[in-house]
Image (spheres, coloured by chain):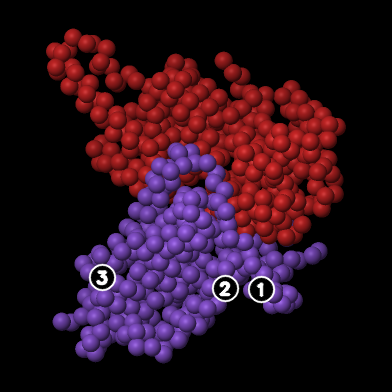
Chain colours: A red, B purple
Amino acid sequence: MSQYKAMNAFQALLSGHAVSRRAAARALAAITALAALTACGGDKPEAAPAMSEFRVALLTPGPISDQAWNGGAYDGLMAIRDSLGAKVSHIQTKTPAEFEENFRQYGAQGYDMVVGHGFEFQDAALRVAPAYPNTVFVCTSGNATAPNLAGMNFAFEEASYQAGMIAGALTKSGIIGAIGGTELPPVRASFVAFERGAKFTNPNVTVLISYLGTWDDVNAGKEQALAQIARGADIVFQNADAAGLGILAAAREKNVLAFGANSNQNKIAPDHILGSIVIDWPRALLQVAREVQSGEFKSTVYQFGLRANVVKLVLNPKLASRIPANLKARVDSVGDAIREGRFHEMDDVLRPADKLPDTTRP
Amino acid sequence: MMVPLEDFLAAAVRTATPLAFAALGECVTERSGVINIGLEGSIICGALAATIVAGGVGVTGGFAAGAAAGLIVTLIFALFTVYLRADQIITGTAITLLSLGFTGLVYKAFYGATGVGLTIPTIGAVDIPLLSNIPLLGRALFSQPVVTYALYAIVPIMTWWFWRTHTGLALRAVGESPDAALAAGVRPRLVQLLAVLFGGAFAGIAGATLVLAQSGTFVENMSAGKGFIAIAIVVLGRWTPLGVTGAALLFGGASALQYLFQSLGWSNVPYQLFLALPYVLTLVVLARASGRSAAPAALARRKLTLG
């Protein structure tokens, strides 16, 4: 136990995130509470139940300063802290080998809920979950379940299809690009949706799809985008987390249009980003955390898409005039079809668990 | 289908520039008998220092800050390896890990826990009159940021320094035989210290180049292994400035080829094959080039002299 904490502190020191301060604050709080108890001879019974406080941890695969996937989840963690009064902790994992170890750390410390942020955490969560039955493990983009393991699926492809419709209609060169970090199933599904959406409004469009093999290398992101732009792409869609900032920089430099992903990135390049495919992390993570806190946790794959109002295409108001009214109407009507369950363009790509209707909100 | 060859060549030179800076610096370091695995740490610290300073003082100050940060990081490395004679590989690894964490900490202290998606002014490409109009190669070689042009001067100067000056000879002597150098009146520790610091400053410039001449933003871990690639490039370039620059260009070219291939839209080829291309190509060249070893004889030796 103590070596886990030491590891935790060491890792926090190395990766330098706020956890160390929180861990220190928690230790300080515990000492203060203990001192208060001994000083007052135990006449303050409400100071004791530190065991029952609700604790939530988040593991991200990359830095939370990416303005996208990781930063969004951190916002969700902060929402859990502020709305549910939870004690929260965050670790940025360095390598996949650390996924399992970090899960075990939090399990051993008796955390109530541990979120592994991304499909890549699923295998580790499946291995660890049986050892810590009192901790709920949640895997974003996961599709597996266990008695204390749930997946959260984000129907990113729904809004990607809408973005593709806009890109297909607006491209002048007839070539658009999509660049991902690595080919994770949800990223692939999102790009397929983007391509099909584009072909829906422009059957002759060419869609270039590239992967960086990294989520951090912002220079590789920029070079890959420049290569696509050199090939004639005039709209690029990025889904590469921190490296995606390089893709947006390329769009700015070469004056082409772009779509952002995972958080609202419209302000990063306000003159070039048509819109962002946003996941409302606070809303989604709060919902699951509430269920865990109130003991209503269900071992299931939570579905969040357009209908749950968690995934959405947020258009950049500054470039709204670029999108003709009739195109906007078509995009909106596809959105309605998705919300009403009448949209089946992506059924052949999605994993079975991802095809279920959205989880209804309490 | 149009294949954008000019853009490909320009991308090759762009990608090679920071690698060449880091590798040329490491080449000097290794010539003195020290292998600095902590290069990655100097690159990321250089990138962050450049980011912070360029925002306030401007791009030139940013490059200076990058070099200074890279140098300071290697000062720690030098203290442990040159003076305390600690294991160079272990020290270098520790420096890299420390720097990656430390830069994340500082970045968050400056820009908040979730960052801001920084947009930093970059130095644009400067066209050299006439030369940049040469078909095919003109834009690649002569329409680049000033840092690339600096390399065109540094490589011949460094070659001349290595083989035609007393200090160059002293540097190489320490890397080959510290005892002989000592006997000839050279101070091996001082030479190693200066060589290590030189390499650190160059790695810092490489980091500054990543931000100020290319991406225009800072991202945690954005060095993405470039320090380790630079070390491989030194081996590939057989410890000579020209060879190292050529090797950097080869790696830059292979990376650019990877970007080009992916952008051609051959969606039925697994993208991982393209991503592996630079490394496979490097391996092939390394295998073909491996004849007589050109490594400094005293490289990574812990006990400096017999005395």
Write down the quadrant of residue B43 in the picture: bottom left
Q: Can you identify the residue that label 3 sits on?
A: B82
Q: CA distance from mark 1 to mark 3?
A: 43 Å
Q: Residues within 10 Å of mark 3 (few under 14, many from 20)?
A: many
* Chain that bears disc 3: B
Disc 3 or disc 2, which is closer to the eye? 2
**Which residue bears the numbered disc 2?**
B149
Query: Which residue of the protein is positioned furthest toward the front in this rendering?
Result: B57
- Look at 63% across and 48% down and name the residue there: A248
- Image marks 1 and 2: residues in contact by CB distance under 8 Å: yes
Q: How far apart are the two marked residues, 1 and 2, measured between alpha carbons? A: 10 Å
What amino acid type should be assigned to the residue bearing mark 1? Ile
Chain label for disc 2: B
* Of callouts 3 and 2, the N-terminal one: 3
Direction from residue A24 to residue A322 in the image, left or right: right
Regarding mark 3 in the picture, which secondary structure is present there? Answer: helix
Amino acid at circle 3: Val
Relative image position of residue A58 (x, y in whole percent): 44, 34
